[in-house]
Amino acid sequence: MTYEELIERLDPTVYQNLKRSLELGKWPDGRRMSPEQREITLEAVIYYENKHNIPEEQRTGFIDRGEKAGTACDPTVNLGKQKPDADSGQFTEVKV
């Protein structure tokens, strides 16, 4: 069985348990998830959500921009104004 087949056949209850484990950072039995386990679980959850057409607002990592959507507070909006990173005249080189 391939990874794709495994995710396609994943039971919705198992998906919910994996998602909850990611939220809490620990498995249902209370053991902490290792960074590697979190990474693999996150990949599986995201893949599951894409494969099963979970609505965007219910997906892992979704940010509800609410009434700020489309305004200057929304990073997806390009207002055409480019701020310079820094003024080179404001820094002084110090040699130690």
Image (cartoon, rainbow, N blue to C red):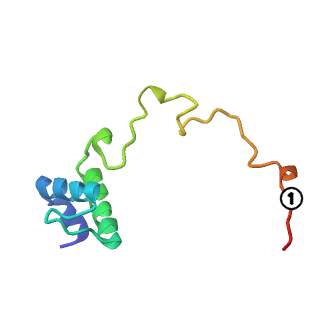
| Horizontal relation, residue 53 to residue 92: left or right | left
Closer to us: 77 or 24? 24
- Is residue 7 placed above or below 49 in the rendered structure? below
User: x and y percent of residue 66 in the render?
Assistant: 41, 29
User: x and y percent of residue 13 in the render?
Assistant: 11, 54
Q: How many marks?
A: 1
Residue 37: which quarter of the image? bottom left
| Horizontal relation, residue 45 to residue 12: left or right | right
Task: Identify the secondary structure beneath mark 1.
Answer: loop
| Horizontal relation, residue 45 to residue 67: left or right | left
In the picture of the structure, the residue carrying the numbered disc 1 is 92
x 43%, y 34%: residue = 65
Furthest-top residue in view? 67
x 30%, y 51%: residue = 50
Give the quarter of the figure containing the C terminus.
Answer: bottom right
User: x and y percent of residue 42 in the render?
Assistant: 31, 61
User: x and y percent of residue 21 in the render?
Assistant: 23, 59
- Is residue 93 placed above or below 2 in the rendered structure? above
Q: Residues within 10 Å of mark 1 (few under 14, many from 20)?
A: few
x 76%, y 45%: residue = 84
> Looking at the picture, which amino acid does disc 1 mark?
Thr
- Is residue 86 placed above or below 80 in the rendered structure? below
x 24%, y 69%: residue = 3
